[in-house]
Amino acid sequence: MQQHVHAELIGGPEDGRSFIIPAPEADLPLGQFTFPSPRDGESPCARYDRHDRRADGVWRYQYAGEPVIRS
């Protein structure tokens, strides 16, 4: 059964944005992702890495820069 968790972005162009993401394994969400997705054709993309979990259960993702997109 797939769960969902609340997430918040810290730093970078999307600082403060919060949303719900899938957590397919025991309430542990994705370790990192890019926003917007490189497949959406927008660039640059901002990479965020899972950082920690607040006391209220919200997962925080720290800005980790712009990934190199190779075509």
Image (cartoon, rainbow, N blue to C red):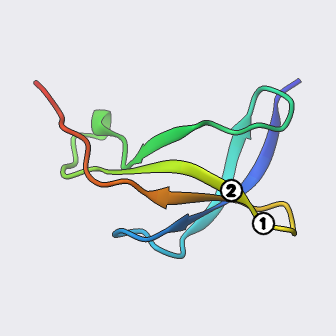
Residue 41 position in % (x across, y down): 22, 40
Residue 68 position in % (x across, y down): 18, 37
**Residue at x 34% of width, y 70% of height:** 13
User: Could you tell me which quadrant the C terminus lies in?
Assistant: top left
Instruction: Give SS at disc 1.
Output: loop
Q: Is residue 47 left or right of residue 17?
A: left
Instruction: Give SS at disc 2.
Output: strand
* Position of 14 relative to 22 (above/below): below
* Position of 2 relative to 32 (above/below): above
The quadrant holding residue 22 is top right
Circle 2: residue type? Asp
Circle 1: residue type? Arg
Q: Is residue 55 left or right of residue 58?
A: right
**Residue at x 36% of width, y 50% of height:** 36
Residue 28 position in % (x across, y down): 76, 37
Q: Which mark is residue 37?
A: none
Q: Is residue 65 left or right of residue 48?
A: left
Residue 49 position in % (x across, y down): 50, 47
Q: Is residue 31 left or right of residue 22?
A: left
Reading the image, the residue beneath label 1 is 54
Q: Are marks 1 and 2 in contact (CB under 8 Å)?
A: yes
The quadrant holding residue 30 is top right
**Residue at x 76% of width, y 27% of height:** 24
Reading the image, the residue beneath label 2 is 52
Crowding near the residue tagged with mark 1, few <14, some 14–19, many ≥20 C-alpha atoms within 10 Å: few
Q: Nearer the viewer, residue 66 or 21?
A: 66
Q: How many marks?
A: 2
